[in-house]
Image (cartoon, grey):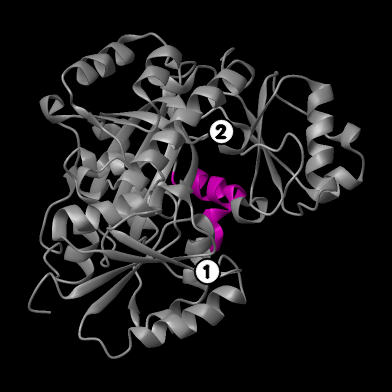
């Protein structure tokens, strides 16, 4: 390729993650992205920087591969590289599963399916973490077979509250029942029996992860976004310090306020792991600081950029540029690893909720004071409010979506976050 413009961004999904990547491509290259998804979500609606085309059933096979076979034909004879970016866990799994076919047409910056299977299962990931000395919470696995022997027979070896989450995040997307959450904080034995029963009675078949609950509020969390090139060398590491999470049951764990942070010890530890397992592409780690032993405990790895990962681009590390320089121009190969956020004077606060909500609900501490100082200095931004993509329809929709967070925090914060 003679020019870095000889490519087309092809995104999978239509949520805030997709919009963040589309915005990164547009800000750096002035290019409009094309996205394919099963349904249209609000963050990408009425946008002029990403065109979304929907196909019912696209988020699983056979709908995915049937439609991708047709979509691939559109890109067969163009004189540009079509860079395929999956922006959700399910799409990552599907892309890796069909990687051999998709690579005939697209640039596919993802690992093979056998490694994906090991990493998307929290159970398998913790086994790998143990091999590479990565700290994680004390963990017990609960299987459907354990439940079928009687929920009352399942031992809970940790003090309450305990954490409970599905091992298979992709299967969990299809499980629905009253009280369903992305992750549970169980207060007592009665609640434990009730939740485990509902999970398996409503069709979930994979394992559950029961964990020692690490004390502390959302400001003890950290999120790390990385890019690893095609030669399995880590090229970007950008650590974020979440100060607030969405308390809505289905969205618990989704960050809505992030300060950039620098921690070389964390960077070194994760870089060693990623290069040792021959990873490639985007990934995102969630971890929490455990004041009991002063370590960061890993919860999971996501084989994609995080839904809030525009905080990386916002702070000067454009995510689109890394994949283009790696897979299109080749310029990334000889560049050193970037360990982000070393200059506090250049840092910006990322918000996914109205400023009013952040000020009211974020825990009062030194980090919040720093965030408030950034707000006062106008050194902050969001993913969806982009001046170059703000028609009246889009502006009203995004303002309404932000406004809804007032009610979500009022209804759910005390129950799900208030006593942490």
Residue appearing at x 33%, y 14% in the figure: 368
State the residue in front, 65 or 323.
Answer: 65
Numbered mark located on residue 106 in the image: none
Indicate yes or no whether the magenta region holds residue 51. Answer: no
Quadrant occupied by the C terminus:
top right
Disc 1 versus disc 2: distance between alpha carbons?
24 Å
Indicate yes or no whether the magenta region holds residue 126. Answer: yes
Residue appearing at x 33%, y 84% in the figure: 75
Task: Specify the farthest residue to the left.
Answer: 2
Q: Main secondary structure of the magenta part?
A: helix
As drawn, 215 above or below 283? above
In the image, is 315 to the left or to the right of 68? left
In the image, is 336 to the left or to the right of 311? left
Q: Is residue 227 visible?
A: yes
Image quarter of residue 403: top left
Q: Position of residue 337 (x, y in %)?
A: 17, 49
Query: To which residue does mark 2 refer?
Result: 252
Mark 1 and mark 2 lie on one chain; the one further toward the N terminus is: 1
Residue appearing at x 17%, y 46% in the figure: 338
Q: Position of residue 50 (x, y in %)?
A: 32, 60
Image quarter of residue 112: bottom left
Numbered mark located on residue 94 in the image: 1
Q: Secondary structure at mark 1?
A: helix
Residue appearing at x 84%, y 23% in the figure: 190
Q: Position of residue 3 (x, y in %)?
A: 8, 74
Total marks drawn?
A: 2
Quick one: label 1, few (<14), some, or many (20+) residues within 10 Å? some
Q: Position of residue 320 (x, y in %)?
A: 23, 57
As drawn, 273 above or below 58? above
Quick one: label 2, few (<14), some, or many (20+) residues within 10 Å? some
Q: In the rendered structure, which segment of residues is drawn in magenta? A: 117-132
State the residue in front, 154 or 109.
Answer: 109
């Amino acid at each position: 390729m003679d020019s870095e413009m000889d490519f087309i961004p092809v995104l999978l999904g239509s949520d805030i993650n997709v919009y963040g990547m589309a915005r990164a491509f547009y800000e750096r290259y002035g290019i409009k992205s094309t996205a394919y998804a099963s349904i249209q979500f609000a963050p990408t609606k009425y946008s002029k920087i990403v065109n979304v085309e929907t196909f019912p059933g696209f988020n699983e096979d056979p709908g995915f591969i049937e439609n991708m076979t047709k979509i691939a034909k559109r890109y067969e004879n163009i004189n540009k590289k079509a860079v395929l970016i999956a922006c959700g866990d399910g799409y990552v799994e599907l892309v890796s599963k069909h990687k051999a076919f998709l690579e005939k047409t697209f640039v596919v910056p993802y690992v093979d399916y056998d490694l994906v299977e090991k990493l998307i299962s929290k159970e398998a990931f913790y086994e790998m973490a143990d091999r590479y000395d990565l700290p994680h919470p004390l963990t017990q696995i609960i299987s459907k077979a354990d439940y079928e022997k009687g929920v009352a027979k399942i031992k809970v070896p940790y003090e309450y509250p305990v954490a409970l989450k599905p091992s298979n995040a992709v299967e969990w997307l299809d499980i629905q029942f009253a009280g369903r959450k992305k992750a549970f904080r169980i207060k007592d034995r009665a609640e434990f029996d009730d939740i485990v029963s509902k999970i398996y009675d409503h069709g979930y078949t994979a394992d559950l992860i029961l964990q020692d609950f690490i004390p502390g509020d959302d400001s003890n969390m950290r999120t790390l976004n990385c890019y690893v090139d095609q030669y399995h060398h880590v090229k970007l590491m950008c650590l974020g310090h979440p100060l607030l999470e969405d308390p809505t049951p289905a969205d618990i764990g989704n960050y809505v306020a992030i300060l950039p942070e620098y921690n070389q010890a964390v960077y070194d530890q994760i870089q060693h792991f990623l290069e040792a397992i021959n990873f490639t592409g985007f990934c995102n780690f969630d971890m929490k600081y455990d004041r009991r032993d002063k370590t960061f405990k890993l919860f999971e790895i996501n084989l994609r950029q995080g839904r809030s990962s525009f905080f990386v681009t916002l702070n000067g590390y454009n995510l689109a540029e890394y994949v283009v320089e790696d897979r299109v121009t080749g310029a990334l190969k000889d560049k050193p690893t970037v360990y982000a956020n070393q200059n506090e004077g250049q840092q910006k606060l990322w918000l996914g909720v109205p400023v009013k909500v952040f000020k009211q609900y974020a825990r009062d501490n030194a980090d919040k004071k720093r965030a408030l100082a950034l707000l006062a200095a106008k050194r902050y931004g969001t993913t969806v409010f982009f001046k170059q993509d703000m028609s009246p329809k889009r502006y009203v929709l995004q303002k309404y979506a932000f406004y809804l967070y007032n009610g979500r925090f009022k209804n759910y914060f005390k129950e799900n976050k208030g006593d942490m």
